[in-house]
Structure formats: C-alpha cells, structure tokens
Amino acid sequence: MTKSDNPRETVNLFLEDAFANSKSILSVSVLPFTSIFLLAGCAEVSSTLTPQGQGAAEIANLWWVMFWLATGVFIVVMGLALFALFHSRSGDNEESETSSRHDNLLIVSGGVATVIILIVVYFFTLRTINVLAAANPSDEFTIEVVGRQWWWEVHYPNQQVITANEIHIPVGQTVALQVTSGDVIHSFWVPQLHGKIDMIPGQTNTFWLQADQPGEYYGFCAEFCGIQHAKMAFVVIVEPLEEFRAWLEQQNQPAVEPVDSLIREGQRVFLAANCDQCHTILGTSARSTLGPDLTHFASRRTLAAGILPNTRQHLAEWITNPQQAKPGNLMPATTLAGSELEALLAYIESLK
Ligand code: CUA
C-alpha cells in the first residue's frame, strides 16, 4: 500500500489498492475454471452459492450467515472510521472528558459485540457440522475415488465397474464415497453438491454425495498437487435411478468386439503402439492400470480429466501430443502414420 501524510488521501489509496488486488485475485482464481467450463460446454458456473444438494445447501447457509455478519461488521467499522476521519474534536476540557467516556463505552460495546458474533458463528458452525455428520449414506452404490496426478480413478466395487474422471450417481440418494490417493495429497470437491474432502495416500477418507436434481456438476481438485493441479477436473452426472442402473449395467460389460475392418485395425494399432502398457480395455489383452481404464471411454463427456470435450479432434491431439494440453502429465506422445491414427481414433470412438 502506498503511504500519504493526509489521512483522507491514505484512505483513498488504501481503497484503490484493495480494489486492484481483489480484481487480480479474482481473475487468477476464476480464469482456469472458466476456461474448463467453456471447453466442456457447461453454461452454469459451478459455485458453492448455487447448491444442488443437501451438503452444499447446509454449507451455503453457513456461508450466508457469516457473510451478513461480516457485512454488518464492515459497515459499522467503516462508518466509525469515516466518522473519526471527518469529525474533528474541540480542545475544550469538559467536552473531551465526556467524549473519553463515550470512547470507553464504544470500545467495551465493540468487545461485547465481537464475543456475541463469534458465539453465533460458533453455534451455526457446530450445527452445520452436526447436520452433515448425521447423513446416513447408502452402501448400495459405494464409490471409491483415487486421486492421481492428474486424473480421477473411479470404482463402483459392488458392481465391479471402473471408470475415470466421470462419476454417475442416482438423483436424491445419499451415496457413500471412499476417497484416497495413489501419489500425493489431492482434495475432492464438487462445489454444488458438498464440501471438500482430502485424498491422502495410504488413508481412506469417507464422504458422501447427494444431489436434488438430475444434471451435470463439475468437480475439481482443491489441493495443490503439482503443475497440472488446475487441470484436474471431473464431472458428476446425476440421473434417475433407472438410468443410473442402466449405466452401471452397460459399464460392467467388456468392450464391444470390433466387427468393422477399420475398427479392427484400430485395435491392432492400440496394442502395437503400446497403449496397453498403461491402459485397460476389458475384452482385450490390455490390462494395465497406470492410466485411466478405457473400456467405455467413448461414453464419457470429457477427456484429459475434465479439461477437453471428448471429440475426435481433441482425442487426436491428445494422443499425438498430450503434453501440449497438459504439460507434465504422464501420457507419452504416440507417433502414428495418418491411416493408423484414423484407425485408432475409430477404435477408441467405438468404445461406448
Ligand atoms: Cu490433484 Cu490438485
């Protein structure tokens, strides 16, 4: 902050600095996410202030309580500061004794008000913690999520389904979630559905998800986990129970056997280009778990962990130059002749 001898000028400079700082902080924190939403074609911003599930709604209520209390405090403090700034005192002794008594009263009431505000916030926080802890998630569709640099491995152990970067849940149901990490600490966060939960290597944390309405909700990694932390996103797809069961049933199947000659050639390229060294495609010999399971890759909305729409062009760019979209990720570039790439793309796109 720039200093000045004139108090009024100092206040102006302070406000200018604060405004400039808040603008830059806002743009730095919001920009990467905005680009993801635009790329993924998501119109609604994924905000904790537009809750779509019980967990997020409770957290938003607490946020609003704290926001209005803080707003009240800000207005009172700024009012007093402005009053002090523009109200000059006379040198009269008797008057200065009265105002000294007023000052003391003001200081004591400020202290009492602070204690009352902290007690109110404490009460609302405890209430929110209790309500969130009292949720009784169903084990029927337990989901295990493993955070990896920089993608999400998703298991439905009861249905023997494995997928990546996309989580399906039935609408209205409170689904149990178990999260851990395969490398460094990550944090699982779907702002519109619930708070954050740390994903810690060697430890399983339990959590739950619940959504009131069908729809697509974006999730992010909320703990710095390396250079592509900002590009570690996923999508939660909330659907009616019947659709959800059908999805599980479909994801449980091995990949469709290629019948078309181009797709058969693509499968050959996939195995010959060593894609099977990192990926699994059930129904083929590819069984490695270093990278995402691709058995039903074509059924997913996004690729590269929520950062690109799952289209042929993005897929081609991702296969031939994965370091461009996400520098530092573990996927090696694959050099293929044009016809081989076409066949590989056709094969991967057939993995519905
Ligand atoms: Cu994973 Cu940040």
Image: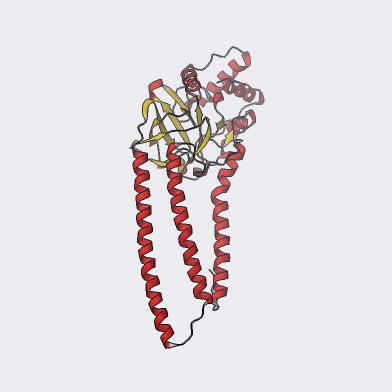
Query: In the rendered view, does 220 fall on the left or right side of 40?
Result: left
- In the image, residue 344 above or below residue 97: above
Closer to the camera in the image, 315 or 221: 221
Tell me the colour scheme of the image.
secondary structure
Who's the residue at 50% across and 29% down the image?
238
Viewport quadrant of the C terminus = top right
Who's the residue at 56% across and 42% down the image?
45
Closer to the camera in the image, 2 or 320: 2
Residue 188 seen anywhere in this rendered image of the structure: no
- In the image, residue 10 above or below residue 294: below
Query: Percent x, y for residue 57?
Result: 45, 41
Query: In the rendered view, does 165 fall on the left or right side of 337?
Result: left
Query: Percent x, y for residue 255?
Result: 51, 17
Query: Percent x, y for residue 225?
Result: 45, 44
Residue 247 seen anywhere in this rendered image of the structure: yes
> In this view, which residue lies farthest toward the top?
259
Closer to the camera in the image, 125 or 4: 125
Who's the residue at 48% across and 58% down the image?
71
Closer to the camera in the image, 174 or 280: 174
Quadrant hosting residue 273: top right
Query: In the rendered view, does 205 fall on the left or right side of 87?
Result: left
Query: Percent x, y for residue 331?
Result: 52, 34
Question: How many marks overall?
Answer: 0
- In the image, residue 86 above or below residue 169: below
> In this view, which residue lies farthest toward the bottom?
92
- In the image, residue 350 above or below residue 171: above
